[in-house]
Amino acid sequence: MAEIRELPRVSVNKLGEYLTATPARRKRIIYDQKHPPEQQYLRYPEASHAITDFLCRGQDLSILRDHQRRFACSVPQTEFEAQRLHLCSEALERFADLVPWLDLNETIVSAVGAEPPVLEMAGVTISVRPEVVLQRMDKHGNARVGLMKLYFAKHTPLDEKSGQYIGTMLQRFAEQHLCQLGPCDHRLIQVVDVFAGTIFTAPRAHIRRLSDVVLACEEIAERWSVH
């Protein structure tokens, strides 16, 4: 049976989209987040896992190719599974093109883990689920921390405003949950739109954007029961 979430919960990527969406699209986002698809119908978990593996093991492109071969050798049981494997392989191809622009020199990259904490804002639980933690020393030798979040949507690319909203929420997540690793550096917050080939960083000025996020969450909480 399909899940129905009784309490307001939204993914950070969908909240980023919600903040710049039309009224009709906002209504649809709330409905989809209240009635999420079953796990087996998610399209990109294998691509996320493969890219995380690549990032955490030295960024050797052969790791991506190994995962692509694994996808190609898998025997799909359904048409949906065949499509998913094809999309995941294409996502790895697109991500490989982005690697030179990630600027991960002298950066320690580590996986976040299977069950990361969440953000709570205005009665809404925000599922952030970044792929990796980024750690680097600044020019004074002080530890700085950031995050990378992957965005997979082949036909609905992020615009700059949505990317910056997601980056702002990632920065808030790092400040709340990674402070033991050092202060968050907004330049180490990366939102990677895999299919569009764009990389967004968190903006230096984020107070107004956080206020917009809170207002959006208030709206989602108010409308949750009617969708």
Image: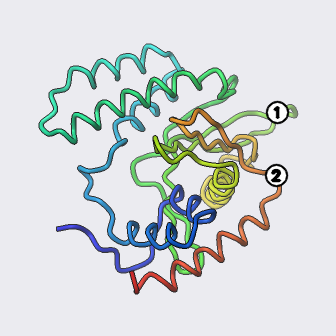
Give coordinates of residue 24: x percent, y percent: 50, 71
SS class, disc 2 = loop
Query: Is the C-beta separation of discs 2 and 1 under 8 Å?
Result: no
Mark drawn on residue 224: none
Instruction: Say if 125 sits above or below 177 in the image.
Output: below
Q: How are the colours assigned in the image?
A: rainbow
Q: Quadrant of the C terminus?
A: bottom left
Q: Name the residue: 29% across, 74% down.
A: 4
Graded by Cα atoms within 10 Å as few (under 14), some (14 to 19) or many (20 or more), the crowding at tag 2 reads few
Give coordinates of residue 8: x percent, y percent: 45, 76
Name the residue tied to disc 2. 204
Displayed quadrant of residue 192: top right
SS class, disc 1 = loop
Q: Quadrant of the N terminus?
A: bottom left
Q: Name the residue: 21% across, 20% down.
A: 73
Instruction: Say if 124 sits above or below 119 in the image.
Output: below
Q: Name the residue: 75% across, 41% down.
A: 187
Q: Name the residue: 51% across, 81% down.
A: 221
Instruction: Say if 209 sits above or below 219 in the image.
Output: above
Count of numbered marks: 2
Using residue 98 as the reference point, say whether residue 66 is left or right of it: left
Front one among 220 and 190: 220
First reached walking from the N terminus: tag 2 or tag 1: 1
Residue 179 visible to the viewer: no
Name the residue tied to disc 1. 141
> What amino acid type is highlighted by mark number 1?
Gly
Distance of mark 2 from mark 1, alpha carbons?
21 Å
Front one among 225 and 183: 225
Give coordinates of residue 195: x percent, y percent: 51, 35
Residue 137 visible to the viewer: yes
Displayed quadrant of residue 172: bottom right
